[in-house]
Each structure stands twice: as C-alpha cells, then as structure tokens.
Image (cartoon, rainbow, N blue to C red):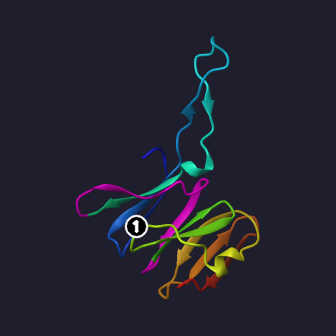
C-alpha cells in the first residue's frame, strides 16, 4: 500500500476497503547535480485494497483504476468508487472492473466527492462543484 486516502467498512465482505494514492516515482535526472527528481504518478497508479477482519490479510482488489479516489461504497454485487468526475464499478464476485452502467455514464457536473449505496443497491453521489447530492441511480 502506498498512501491510504480513503477507507470504508464493507459489511457484506467483513473487510475494510482502502484506496491509495501512490508516492512519486524516481526518474532519470536531467541535471547530474540534482539530488532527486520525481515525476508525478500516472493516473493509472491508484489501487483499492481489502484488509480482512478475520486474519488481517491485505489483498489488491483492483489496480490502475484512475485518479485520486475520493470515496468507496459497496452493494451486494458491486464496489463503487468515485474518482474525479466519474463513478466506476468493480464486480464483487471476482474484483474485475466493469463497464460503466448507463446510469453512471450520464453523470454531468463536477468533482464527485462521495458515493453511497442504499439497501436496494442503488447509488447516490455528492457533487462537490454543484453542491448537491443526487440519486438514486439504478445500477443493479
């Protein structure tokens, strides 16, 4: 794990879901006198991990998933995460990224700062730029 940025308890999986933001990576130096040169992490460097409540094992759920993750939530069959201006999904059954459901592709607006799933598996989200909470979006 690089730098944890968001954590949520996954009640169904009895685990913590933790998003990380990678630390800068060293690169070749243009100036031989420089002591260190860093590049910004690529947007594909973020990961989501699970930490088991049973044995403490850390497992990578998904990697290369986007910009800084601002929120994670889960339903009976999906893990949802907000990154930038989008919400993406991971199948709970096999931890594979899913094609974005049509209801989530239609999101317009600004920075998604939070996501939540209700008991029916529908998604709610907070748009920081619009100052609004919207939902429910049917994704099941």
Q: Mark 1 — residue?
A: 9
Residue at position x 61%, y 25% from top? 37
Within 10 Å of the Cα at label 1, are there few (<14), some (14-19), or many (20+) other Cα atoms?
some
> Relative to 11, is 16 above or below?
above
In the image, 71 versus 26, the foreground residue is: 26
**Quadrant of the image occupied by residue 81:** bottom right
Expressed as whole percent of the image width and height from the top left, the position of residue 27 reads 58, 28
Residue at position x 62%, y 85% from top? 136
> Relative to 115, is 61 above or below?
above
Q: Secondary structure at mark 1?
A: strand
Expressed as whole percent of the image width and height from the top left, the position of residue 109 reads 76, 69
**Left or right: where does residue 44 sit relative to residue 62?**
right
**Quadrant of the image occupied by residue 137:** bottom right
Residue range corresponding to the magenta coloring:
54-77
| Residue 72 inside the magenta-drawn segment | yes
**Quadrant of the image occupied by residue 134:** bottom right
The residue at the far bottom in this view is 120
The residue at the far top in this view is 33
Counting every numbered tag in the picture gives 1
The residue at the far left in this view is 55
Residue at position x 34%, y 65% from top? 15
């Amino acid at each position: 794990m690089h730098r944890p940025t968001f954590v949520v308890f996954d009640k169904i999986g009895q685990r913590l879901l933790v998003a990380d933001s990678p630390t800068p990576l060293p690169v070749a130096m243009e100036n031989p006198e420089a002591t260190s040169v860093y590049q910004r992490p690529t947007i594909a460097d973020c990961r989501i991990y699970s930490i088991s409540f049973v044995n403490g094992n850390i497992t990578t759920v998904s990697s290369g998933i986007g910009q800084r993750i601002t929120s994670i939530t889960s339903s009976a069959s999906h893990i949802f995460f907000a990154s930038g201006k989008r919400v993406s999904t991971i199948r709970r059954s096999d931890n594979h990224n899913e094609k974005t459901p049509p209801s989530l592709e239609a999101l317009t607006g600004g920075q998604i700062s939070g996501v939540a799933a209700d008991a029916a598996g529908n998604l709610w989200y907070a748009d920081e730029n619009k100052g609004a909470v919207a939902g429910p979006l049917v994704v099941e």
